[in-house]
Amino acid sequence: MKLYARYVGWVYIKSFLIVFLALELFYVGIDLLINLKDLPLSANLQLLYVGFTSLSAIGYILPLSLIFALIILHVNMVRSNELISLYALGISKNGLILTPFFISLFIIIIYVGLNFTPFAYAHDYQKSIAKNTAFSKSTTDSFLKFEGKFIYIKELNSAKQRADDVRIFDINGTNLLSTTFADYAKFKDNEWVLEDVNQTVLPQILELGEAGFIKTKIESLDALKGFKPKSIESAASVENSRFNIPDAINFIKTFKNEGIGLDSAKTALYNLAIAPFFAPFLLLIFYYYLPVTGRFLNIALSTFIFVVITLVVWGLLFVLAKFAQASVILPEIGIVLPVILLFAYSIYLIKSHR
């Protein structure tokens, strides 16, 4: 790596860490002031709450920190005449921004990777501590459709992967084919193992003299392959559910043909996997519009304007995501399209400054 690239990258990383830690402390501090009265008396739980609050804040703070770090880097280099000196040495405008851009892109990729893990549920853990409730609380009275079957579950504990009082109604159009009642079921090897099963198969020819219904009692029965507990739990309260990336993908695959609204799950997926990439692309766009020298522009005013633009763009993306979650607009339009437009414009700016 060239000397100027190492210098610019190091200064950018330092600026990012300073802004990120400052915003983290501010977010956690404000949250504690608001929710202090609701926190449990246990010191351990209070420390856990602070930790989970810090993790849940990353999704909001990280993109802003990456952009603010570039603004700080740029302003400091303008004031010290380092930027104009680097240009005078023959360093291209595109070459100077590549290091901060790839650093921000790498950080966003790490963040997206974390969203494949339980890291994405940090907000739920935080709220559980504040409400003094168990995170793995049971879901009751779930009635869902899966692979043409209607399924009722009296109580589901996704942490224990256990369901109590499971009732499966196999229906073909308007005809009831069979019913399967189980006292409880355990999720194992990607399918449910029903225990103490009573199964009734109804006749399809309802005529006098034909065979009647068949009722059998079975100790255990495998059923509902791929119907994961997390998908059931999320479908029971789809509007308030949170996902990590694998759970969101599995939810969409499970219920894509079952008539359940998928906008909430798609919004969660796009928010976790695609929306964070707006930060590197917006960073790239800002770089080409930031002033090169302070002789003709007020640096303080231009810095303030770019900070406000950052917050406005971030706020618009946040509002569009909420509209997508409420099915006001398609998630692809509310989340994916803005990121694609930012990407396309940043590529245009790179090509025009060759």
Image (cartoon, rainbow, N blue to C red):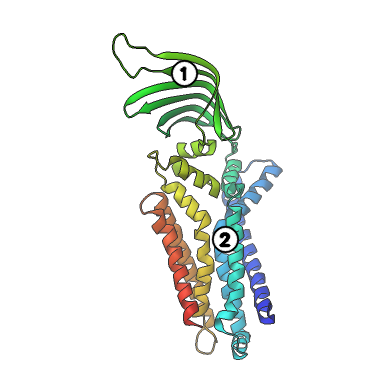
Residue receiving disc 1:
199
Sequence-first disc among 2 and 1: 2
Q: CA distance from mark 2 to mark 1?
A: 53 Å
Q: Is residue 240 visible?
A: no
Q: Is residue 22 above or below residue 206?
A: below
Q: Is residue 322 above or below residue 227?
A: below
> In the rendered structure, which amino acid carries the disc numbered 1?
Gln
Residue receiving disc 2:
61
Q: Is residue 18 left or right of residue 182?
A: right
Which residue is situated farthest in the top direction here?
209
Dot 2 and dot 1 residues touching (CB under 8 Å): no
Q: Is residue 73 left or right of residue 281?
A: right
> In the rendered structure, which amino acid carries the disc numbered 2?
Ile
User: In front: 62, or 349?
Assistant: 349
Q: Residue at x 45, y 70 (%)?
A: 344
Q: Position of residue 323 (x, y in %)?
A: 39, 53
Q: Secondary structure at mark 1?
A: strand
User: In front: 308, or 245?
Assistant: 245
Q: Secondary structure at mark 2?
A: helix
Disc 2 packing (10 Å; few <14; some 14–19; many ≥20): some
Q: Position of residue 169 (x, y in %)?
A: 41, 25
Q: Position of residue 151 (x, y in %)?
A: 44, 29
How many labels sit on residues? 2
Q: Position of residue 210 (x, y in %)?
A: 33, 11
Q: Residue at x 52, y 54 (%)?
A: 272
